[in-house]
Structures are given as C-alpha cells and as structure tokens.
Amino acid sequence: MKQKVVICLIFVLFLTLLCACNGNQVNIGTPAEKPSQITEAVSDPEENRSPAGDEESGVSDMEIPQTGWTEAVPAEYTKAAAEQGAVVCLDYESEDYVRDGSAITKTAYVYTPYGYDENDAETRYNILYLMHGWGGRAGEYFDFAATKNMFDNLIEKGDIPPLIIVSATFYNKNSSTDFSSSIEEFRTFHQDFETHLMPAVEGRFHTYAVSTSPENLKASRDHRAFGGFSLGSVTTWLQFCYDYDYIRWFLPMSGSCWYYGTYGDFRFEDNVDFIEQLVRNENLDERGYFIYHAVGTEDAVKSQSIGMAEEMLSREIFTPEHYVFYRKNGGNHDFNAVQEYLYNALPLFFRDDSTENVQTESQPFTADTAISDVINDPAFGEYGRLIFPVDTGYWSGKTLGDLHLTWYSNIDPNKTVEIANYMKSHAQAGETIFYDIYTDEEKAADPNKADTGLFFFKGDPGEKFAVCNAGGGFAYVGAMQDSFPHALELSKMGYNAFALIYRPGWDTAMEDLSRAISFIFEHGSELEIDTDCYSLWGGSAGARMAADVGSYGTAAFGGDDLPKAGCVVMQYTGHSEWQKIDPPTYVCIGTSDGIANWRTMQRRIEAMSAAGIPTEFHAYEGLSHGFGLGTGTVAEGWINDAVAFWKQQMKKL
C-alpha cells in the first residue's frame, strides 16, 4: 500500500512539473491541510497584501510583513520593453559528480541587461542564478516571453538594478531524468556551481567578483542570488546549506530543504535545526542573508513548503530581515506562479544598491579610510579580518592614519596606506595574496587555526624567499608595522616575501612558523620561488621565532624536516640563547628600547661571532622599541644593509 501511495505522489508531481514547463494552470486536488499558523496569519489576501516596490510599504527598508500574499504582475510588465536585454548560450567544462567524475561539457543560458557592454570592465552587475524543476533544462526561464519581458521591465522601470541572470541545470548529457536520479543530480550541483559554473560565468561576464578565485567570489556574495522552482527550490535550499559563503540572497519557490530526508520524508525539524545552527556558527546574521520563500495556495505540493515555513517561523532567529514566506492566492505549481514570485522577490534583493547605476570598483584607500572598511573590503574576502590584529585589545585608531599598536613606535601612515592599497590592487587583479597553511579539517578541529595564514608579497619568479614574523609579545600579531612593511620592501627588491599571521603564544607561534615554511617548500613550484638560502625575519617576539626555528629547524616544532634558513634577520628582542650551528644573523635595535636591552643583543651577537658564525649588529641612537623600517629615523635604510648581509650568505652556496 505504501509503495502505491509513493508512486501516486510521484505521478502527481510529474504532472504538475509538466504543467510548469508548459506554462498552463492545472488544478490537481490535494488532501485538505490542517489549520496552521501560516493560514491564520495570511487568511485575507486583501488585508495582508504588501506590494513589491511600494515605497510606502517600507519594502525598500525591508519592513514588509514576514508572511503575506504576493502581488500579481502588472500586465504592462509582461509586454516587450523598450530596452531589452539579450540571452546568450554558454558552454562550460565540468565534471560528472554523480558517476565517475569524468570531464563533461555543460550548458547555461545567460541574460545580460540592456546596455551591457562586454568591453566595459569597470561597470559591475549583480547576478541571479535560477534552477529549473524535475525534468527541466538550462535556459528554461527564458523560454517564456512574458518572464523575459518582466526582467526587462523591472530594470527599465527602475524596480531593480541592472542584473545578469543565469538559467542553469543540474543535469548533464549522462543524466537520467527519472525522479530518483534527479535527486542525485541536484544533491551534487553545489560542486558544479562552486568549481565550474560560477567561475565560467563570472570569468566572462562583469559581476562584482573581480576575479574567479574562491576568495574574490566569496568577497562578492552580497551581489549574488540563487533561486529555483520545485526541485530547483530544493536545490536552492541546498545552496544555502553549502554555498552561504558565495550567496546572500535566496528564492526557493515551491519546495523545502532536503538536506535531511527526501520527498515524502521532509524532516522539517531536522533541516531547520541544521539551518539554525549554520546561521549561528557562520555568523550569518551579521554577515547578512535573506530567504524569500514562496508557494501557491493551489500548488499540488504546497504542504512541504508550508511545513518548512511553519518550522522556520517557530524559531526566533529567523526574523523578517532574514526570512519571509509569501503565497500566491490561487497559485498553482506552474510558471505563472514562478513569474509572480520573481516579480515580488527581486525588488527586495540587492537592496543596498542604487537602482540608477551599478557600482564600479572602489577608490584607493587613503589615510582617512576607516580601518573597518579595509577589513571588510570585498577584494579581500574572509581573510580581510587578518590584515589587522584579531586581538582587538592591542590596537586602536579608526582610520589608517590613526593606527596605533601596543609596544610599537614610529608607525608610518603612508606605509600603512601603501600596504593596504598594494594588497587590494593585487587581489583585484586576480592574484592570490593570502594562503591558508592549515586545512579545513585542521581548522575545524582547532578553530584558533582559522586565525593563521601567509600574506604573499610576490617578487621575481624563481627568486629566493623570506618569511617575516611580526612581534606583539606573543599576545597579538602586529603585522602592519613589523612584517608587512618588510615583506613589501623585499618584494620591491625582487624577493618573494611572506608575512605570517600566527596564533599568539610561543608554542603555537613556533608550530605555525614551521608549518608555514613547510607549506612554502611544498608549493615552491606553484609559488615560483627558489628555496635555497631562504631567510627568516622578525621583530620582538617575531625575532625570537626566527631565531629558534633558525637554530633548531622546522622539524623540531612539528614541521617537515627541511633545510635550515640561510640567514636570520632580527630586530629589538632580548633573546640571548644561541648554538654553534645557528645560521648567519643580522641584528638591529634602538639604544632607548625600554623592552629589549640593546646590550643583551650585542652580547649574543659578539658570542656568535667569536664562535665563527657570520653576524652583523647595529644599535641606533635614541630609537625606542618597534620602529619597524625606521622611516624618517636614524635607522632608515637598515633593511638594505640586512639584504646585503643576506646576499653575502647566498654567495657562499
């Protein structure tokens, strides 16, 4: 008996999806539903209507009711607009994720708005990806002239900013479109989306992603939306579960989340538990997300959407700012309903944008730029938060020109601005300027490892490399004064320089530095570096790190068994230990340093020199702790002396 029921349900769904593809309304009877909080909340379509695009309704400020009724698409929106967009076919390379992972070619159709110019790389566009239902295909959303006309009119009338729209598919040439096989296909679609579809589309069309690197795609999530109908709605929910880092706006139309369960076994509570935990763990309330969930009152499979919505609305975390549920009065499981959902939802997406013109790339940073603007700049993505110390108690200042770091002196605002602009310009050019040194699994096991990584200041291909380690008393990482400036100057000289962001604490710092060096050696070919006679640089606590790894080697601290550094460059530290096998060492410090005594450093260097280790020592009159490059002081230019010392060691190879 149960088997017959399942077959009947699938047959009903099949019929309704065929109707969706034909754009015809067909009423299919469904069992009466029990009264629900949703039914009670929106019992009168006229009283609860909140038209999309009505400024008096507060839609522009996202103050619409959390549940309500969609408004019909005005007749003039379904007619041909004066300013019409174009649809092009895009073939792209992907993989057959359901079967053997073999290389395949897939197809998507891309709508570009009126006025789009492929030669205008400065103008950027929001982007919406749309997914069909069971048995559908790529380009389906553009098959209906009324829907394509509606997109044109929404843009022409200023209801939404100019928008790129992609009609994609979870099927490929090897796919079977039977129901169970379709489920397998959409469950793996997020892999195609992340690795192939999104880079293919946004590598060709001008979106807010300044490159197709994962970092820049994630950085542009505020300008990316995903929606789908029926099984495409289920796919949309899964996109939220897997690709929240890439997408901010979601439009599931007639379908629920199947992260757990499947058709007929919807497991609403388990799925909403998962989504709620995801929102909390990934801080999505603060980062921003919005789900416009919709279904018709006569939709043959409306019960799963209503069940999902009831569970979502029962949780306090899903406020109207993040989740709304709207219904089409009399709406069936068809593209007429889909068109109405799109009409109502799209004006609520990308709502921070101007509808007059799309944005262009932001201007360069200045001394007056807020530090928070640098951290949150889309060019940097998630690693923007590591540019300044994550331990906020050790630095102050609102702008780049106001930056102060505990225990540091002579911070040069011009250099701070130069570093920030260097990072941004290279990131926008599509270059990788930041590398994780730990895997996602390692970071999940130890969340503190998420606060680590290497900023790369690339020099000449095939040139030697240096790792620069900032100080901060093993309490924080003062990179903007004590490693970024050094790495930038070394890159200008042609060397490949890395600035390490490590976990505070001696043990963890040593582990992170050893891991970083191991990472660099492992990826030497990819990074285009020469690993012979590399150098380790550091100031204050960072100098201790450079000295200890230089002395004992990376394997002593959990790294690979690698050659020792050819040279160590140290600034202002009271480190006094040394061994006869220590690398050649260059040291500089100020005579007025109240934290590290210059005579301690001098005695260490003299002892090393007496043991036959090449050394060089400089004490600068009147300088205090943490002078960095020493720009504008008696120490200015010391880095040139240090590089000359390093070169002397290279000649001995």
Image: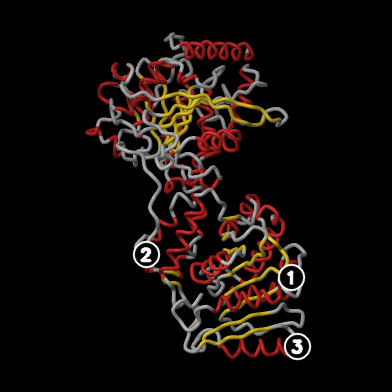
In the drawing, does residue 66 fall left or right of residue 32? Answer: left
Q: Earlier in the sequence, mark 3 or mark 1?
A: 1
Give the Cα separation between the discs numbered 2 and 3: 48 Å
Q: Quadrant of residue 449?
A: bottom right
Residue at image mark 1: 564
Give the residue type at disc 3. Answer: Ala
Percent coordinates x, y for residue 322 in the rendering? 40, 39
Percent position (x, y) of residue 312? 44, 34
Camera-side residue of 278 and 124:
124
Residue beneath the point at 47% across and 10% down: 22
Badge 2 crowding class, 10 Å Cα cut-off, few under 14, some 14 to 19, many 20 or more, is some
459 and 37: which is toward the camera: 459
Q: Residue at x 40, y 22 (%)?
A: 35
How is the rendered protein coloured? secondary structure
- In the rendering, which numbered label is found on residue 611? 3
Q: Is residue 302 above or below residue 259?
A: above
Spatial CA span between label 1 and label 2 = 40 Å
Helix, strand or loop at label 3? It is loop
Which quarter of the picture shows residue 566? bottom right
Give whichever of discs 1 and 2 has the lower sequence position: 2
Residue kind at label 2, given as amino acid type: Ala
Q: Which residue is mark 2?
A: 367
